[in-house]
Amino acid sequence: MAASALEGAVIAFDLDGTLVDTAPDLIGTLNVLLKDEGLPARPLDEARPFIGRGARWLIERGFEAAGQHLHPARVQPLFDRFIAHYLEHIADESRPFPGCEAALDALKAQGARLAVCTNKRTDLSMALLEALGLADRFEAVIGADRAPAIKPDPRHLQAAVDAVGGDIGRTILVGDAATDAGAARAAKAGLILVSFGYTEIPAEDLNPDILIHSFDELPEACGRLLGRTWTPERTARA
């Protein structure tokens, strides 16, 4: 892979289900709320797909799966309790996906600018990244509160690109779910999806430019994608 392919390019990453396997701590927090409300805990595999749209969605879907439809007025108090507990347990079991750190280092070594573009709140994102020793690898972390609108709105990705002084025309969004696919396509950026994340729609059905199954594949995939002109209709499989 030519080093020039990545020099100055922006590689923006989703966080939950892409960089870090956060499901154990997120679903663990959901289950604390369910237990407090006298409802049955949800199994990890069942609740994993609920994570991709943020904590409120996770709470709503989790309670529905446990047999209780939440009145809208109940969501905010439950969300506040969720955040308070989650912050205290944000990295109890959450870990970077295998190969993540080496891939980030390889991308940086070839001149890429790295950013996080996540629907998670910025303070929670920073707390997680710092706890796992990942924060220093990113030039910007743009959570839901730092963007004019959240993914799949393309302005979220554009905010991340602007924060690192990049060009949307030389940007790839690496994610795992429909929100990532929607943001990248609307922004006319490249799209790499991981097959191991949190999504209710299989990643391969979201028509990524490249689908990867391991972070070991990411540096080469980024170089390959940046070395050609892509269109939303073009799909490759790593």
Image (cartoon, rainbow, N blue to C red):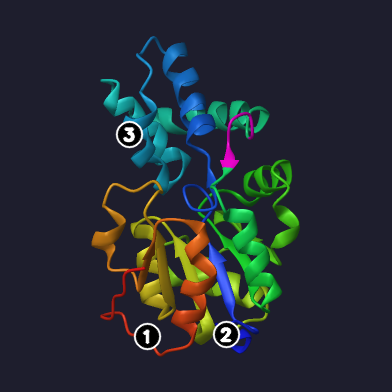
| Gap in angstroms between the C-alphas marked 1 and 2 | 15 Å
Q: In the figure, residue 179 lies in which quadrant?
A: bottom left
Cα–Cα span, label 3 and label 1:
35 Å
Above or below, 65 relative to 196 = above
Q: Is residue 69 visible?
A: no
Q: Nearer the viewer, mark 3 or mark 2?
A: 2
Residues 30 and 45: in front is 45
* Residue at x-position 65% and y-position 68%: 106
Which residue has dot 2 on it? 167
Is residue 49 rendered magenta in the image? no
Q: Determine if the magenta segment contains residue 92.
A: yes
Q: CA distance from mark 3 to mark 2?
A: 37 Å
Identify the secondary structure beneath mark 3: helix
x, y percent for residue 53: 40, 48
Q: Quadrant of residue 163?
A: bottom right
Q: Nearer the viewer, residue 2 or 107?
A: 2
Q: Which segment is the magenta one?
A: 91-95
Tag 3–tag 2 contact (CB < 8 Å): no
Kind of residue at badge 1: Trp
Q: Amino acid at mark 3?
A: Arg
Q: Disc 2 residue type?
A: Asp
Look at the picture and state if 137 lies above or below 112. above
Q: Give the quadrant of the N terminus.
A: bottom right
